Each structure stands twice: as structure tokens, then as C-alpha cells.
Amino acid sequence: MNLVALQTFLAIVRTGSLVRASAAMNVTQSTVTSRLQTLEAELGQTLVLRQKNGATLTAAGIKLRRYAEAMTQLWLQAKQETSLPPGVDAICNIGVHADLWAGYGTLFFDTLRRTRPSIALSVWQGDDSRITQWLANGLVDVAFSFAPPPGQAGQTLHSLHADRLILVGTEADRPIRHDPGYIYVEAGPDFEREHTAAYADADTAKLSFNNAGWAVAHLRQHGGSAYLPHRLVAKAIDEGELFALDGAPEFQRTCFMVVRDSTNAYAGDITAFLDRL
């Protein structure tokens, strides 16, 4: 299978048409068409439906997309690791859930930068399902996630301290219930279930975010209240910018660090990091 053909297929997926894909890859449209036809002939399946207003994936194309992304990413990683510049002896690819970058992600990243300057670091942000996929495909070496991946050979799972989710507001006397400025911040199915039970009599929040950092930014600009990880708002509470609302129930969200067992160039650094925690 031709890697360029896969890259062309992904360009069609990203841009939504063969014309835009040819412009993005700086080749002629006939070249894009030829590469796609070669790929379809090799697989024996139609991957893309050509239409006047663009291109859409067939069922086979949707299935291929995931593998094409994994194969092209693996190729890029292989190129990186087989052509390391002088002074670099390893590459560590880190997958991090957006809400775990502040805290665990930055601490691990800064620790490696400080203790192992010969390691090149690459950080990828993704949700739990994408991080699990990256681990399974070997695209990341270390991951920080809220959902433990299914039992996978060659991976070691470390349970980290659970996130304390506390209700904070921009004023100390904001209501715990029926706050018109309350923001619902998604924090996984367990939090959703427990939050619903604890606030069964409360109104539905008019605002919601699936990113805790964005919710903090909104609070700072517009005011209100929200359940947020304590580690994320501790400094703002200490400085009087946000207030922990007394009497509100607290929740917890489990956190995990997953390490591929083949990650041996910095195994000692990972052990030291876990010992610090």
C-alpha cells in the first residue's frame, strides 16, 4: 500500500473534495484522482463518493480512515526516531486529556525537560477514546487519561490521585442551588450521575463546557459558579479570585497514567515521577 496514496486519501477527508485536496497537496486534480483510484483498486472498494458539491466517504472509506491516520502517524514517528538529531537519544510522545494537562501533564513534561534534556518531547491532546486508540496503535508512549484503557498487553496502568471536583464561584455568597450563572462542566459519566442525584431539584444549567480550562476563563470574564478540579483553581482561591462555596457536595474523578512497556529509555524518570506523586 502506497503511503502517498493514504496521505492523499486523508487530504480528501480533511478538505471535503478532490479539488481542495489537490490544492492542499500542491498537485494536480488528476494526480489526486489517480492516487485515489489506485488505492480503491488495491482494496477492491469504493472509498469516496464524488459529487458536485464535494466528496463523502463510503462505509469502507470510514473504516479505512482510522487505519490510514494510524499508519501515517506511525510513519512520521518512525522517521523521527530513526533520524534523531545530535544530542537527542530518544523521543517521548505524551498523550494528555485536556483537563489533565494542568497538573499531571505539565509536571511530567517539566520533569523530563529538566532531568533528561537529551529526550525530545511531543505532546498530543485528545479525549479518552482517542488516547486509548493512540496507545493501542503505539503512537504515544505515556498517557494521562480519566478512563483506564481496556486490558492491553504491553501497557502498565498507574492509578493517580483522584481529582477533587469542588463548587467554586466568583463571589463567596453565590447560591449553591439555582444559580443563574452556574456552568455545568462535563467530567465523565460518574460525575454526571452523581451530580444529577445531588442536584435533582436544581434547574438545568444554561451553559456547559467539556473543557475545565475554558470554564475557568468564562468565570473570570463573566462570573458565575462551576464544579472544577481543585488543582486547577487552588491558586485562584488562594488569591481571592475564586471562592470555594461552603456546604456544596464534592465529587471525585479518577485519573490514570498509562505507560507502554516498550518505553524503557526513560523508565527511571517515570518511576521517579510516580514516587514524587
Image (cartoon, helix red, strand yellow):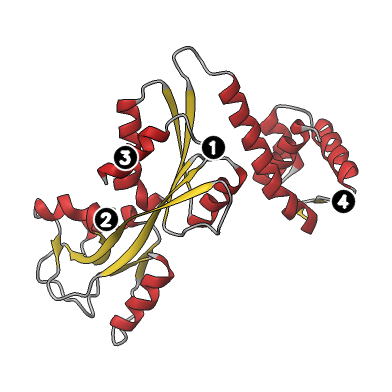
Left or right: residue 240 versus residue 81 is: left
Rendered location of residue 100, percent (x, y):
36, 50
- CA gap between label 2 and label 4 equals 47 Å
Depth check: give the residue in front, 51 or 252: 252
**In the displayed structure image, the side of residue 10 where residue 102 appears, left or right:** left
Q: Does dot 4 land on a helix, a strand or a loop?
A: loop
Q: How far apart are marks 4 and 3 (CA)?
A: 48 Å
Which disc, if any, is residue 262? 1
Q: Which of marks 4 and 1 is nearer the N terminus?
A: 4
Seen from the viewer's position, the closer of residues 66 and 107 is 107
Q: Is residue 67 above or below residue 198?
A: above
Which label was assigned to residue 45?
4
Q: Residue 216 carries which label?
A: 2
Which one is closest to the eye, mark 4 or mark 1? 1
Cα separation between marks 1 and 2: 37 Å
Q: Residue at x 62, y 44 (%)?
A: 137
Measure the alpha-carbon separation of dots 4 and 1. 36 Å
Q: Distance between the residues labelled 3 and 2?
A: 27 Å
The amino acid pointed to by label 3 is: Phe
- Look at label 4 and name its amino acid: Gln
Structural crowding at the residue carrying mark 3, measured as other residues with C-alpha within 10 Å and reported as few (<14), some (14–19) or many (≥20): some
- Please say if the residues under marks 1 and 3 sit with CB atoms less than 8 Å apart: no
Q: For the point 17% across and 53% down, which residue is it?
A: 234
The image position of residue 239, as x and y in percent, is: 9, 50
Q: Nearer the viewer, residue 80 or 235?
A: 80
Residue 273: which numbered mark, if any?
3
- Residue at x 35%, y 31% (from the top left corner): 112
Q: Earlier in the sequence, mark 4 or mark 3?
A: 4
Q: Earlier in the sequence, mark 1 or mark 2?
A: 2
Dot 1: what SS?
loop
Q: Residue furthest bottom?
A: 201
In the figure, residue 229 lies in which quadrant?
bottom left
